[in-house]
Image (cartoon, rainbow, N blue to C red):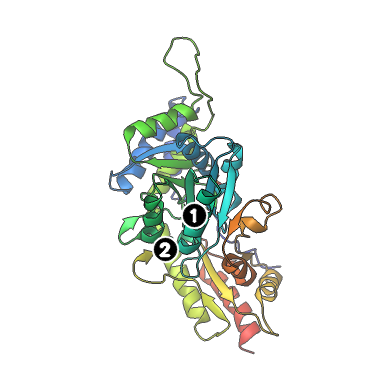
Amino acid sequence: MADKRVFLSLPQLSGQEQKYIQRALNDNWITSGGPNVTDFENDLEAYHGNEVFVAALNSGTSAIHLALILLKVKAGDEVICQSMTFSASANPILYQGATPVFVDSETETWNICPESLEIAIKSRIDKGKKPKAIIAVHLYGMPYKVDEVHAIAEKYAIPVIEDSAEALGSHYKGKKCGTFGMYGIFSFNGNKIITTSSGGALVANSKELKEKAIFYATQSRDEAIHYQHSEIGYNYRMSNVCAGIGRGQMKILNSNLESKKQIHDFYVDLFTDINEITVFKSASSDYNSNYWLSTILIEPNQNINKDILLQAFEKANIESRPLWKPMHLQPLFCNYPYYGNKVSEDLFNKGLCLPSGTNLDDSEKTRIKDVINKLFKE
Ligand SMILES: *Cc1c(COP(=O)(O)O)cnc(C)c1O
């Protein structure tokens, strides 16, 4: 019999989800909002030291969209976005009819490059358009250069939307990711560090902004007995059933983070003697990644490159995947302005994501080891 497929990252259940889902069913509260949603928001706020205000939504993408709406980004405006990311960071800019301006990465964190960011801001201002927001991403859970990026944002008075979709539990200089920006966002999609099946959250720094986000997320209903609307509304609120899953998931967030770190250590160990491969890790103790996915760079030579490695894994029924393809190289986005060099392009050409599921077991690790030993040690 063929070996079972090893996936990049599968959800891990705590066993307590059922209890909270059952509560939603018992209460006959299976629509959006509700007691589980409020409790899940409280859990997330408590996890972040009760220093922020969290609105639970139906996806991370909706959270980014609402952040842009709260910042009054409109048609014709420009928004800076890290180029190396998942398309969901950039799509909401187009939803608003605004123009994305993409910025390259730097090599230490793989995230938005402060130098290229400042060049981009100056250039757009020279062209007569000051960007309305900056979307910076903690890719693969690795914090971006928070101090540098936020210093530039402050210098030009441009708000930062912190795409922390992959970075729940990461921290920078001891402060949790998702809490640095004017707005932060999380995703609880099936493959993220915890899941609500599908879901996300917007992090705001005041109760008023949280409530405004919920107002937009629930169809912008004005206060009236009848349905009355003076602003565009959205159906973006998290369902009470999904929030039940989220409540159960919060119980294993810390153990998931530990497992992710152990998987990262497994890869560091596996690749120590292989010169062509470097495991992506924190540049210094300031950067604490949740290692949502373990990733590597392969320096190509005549025997090895990322495609050869990907195919070798595939033959053993093990999933690996190239890094996010930068937005400025995507057919949808390639005609928008781009500032940078070829850092993100180079990362894309050399990088792979490796199986990082918290449920990765010893026999699966052995299969991964075997592929590597066969390629490099024989
Ligand atoms: C997953 C992800 C999103 C979107 O989250 P969804 O919940 O899937 O809508 C946004 N940005 C990044 C970087 C992501 O990885």
Q: Nearer the viewer, residue 126 or 197?
A: 126
Q: Nearer the viewer, residue 243 or 84?
A: 84
Q: Could you tell me which secondary element the residue under label 1 belongs to?
A: helix
Specify the quadrant that holds the N terminus: bottom right
Judged from this view, the residue extending furthest toward the bottom is: 378
Please report the residue visible at 49 percent of the width from the left and 39 percent of the height from the top: 68
Q: Amino acid at mark 2?
A: Ser
Which label is found at residue 141? none
In three-dimensional space, the C-alpha distance between marks 1 and 2, rounded to whole angstroms, equals 31 Å
Mark with earlier residue (1, 2) = 1
Task: Tell me: 370 left or right of 201.
Answer: right
**Marks 1 & 2, CB-CB < 8 Å contact:** no
Q: Nearer the viewer, residue 177 or 129?
A: 129
Residue 197 at least partly seen: no
Q: Which residue is mark 1?
A: 122
**Displayed quadrant of residue 53:** top left
Foreground mark, 1 or 2?
Answer: 1
The percent coordinates of residue 64 (x first, y second) are: 50, 42
Q: Residues within 10 Å of mark 1 (few under 14, many from 20)?
A: some
Q: Could you tell me which secondary element the residue under label 2 belongs to?
A: loop
Please report the residue visible at 52 percent of the width from the left and 63 percent of the height from the top: 105
Which label is found at residue 289? 2
Please report the residue visible at 41 percent of the width from the left and 15 percent of the height from the top: 223
Using the image, determine if residue 43 lies above or below residue 172.
Answer: above
Q: Amino acid at mark 1?
A: Lys
Task: Tell me: 77 left or right of 316.
Answer: left
The percent coordinates of residue 152 (x first, y second) are: 40, 56
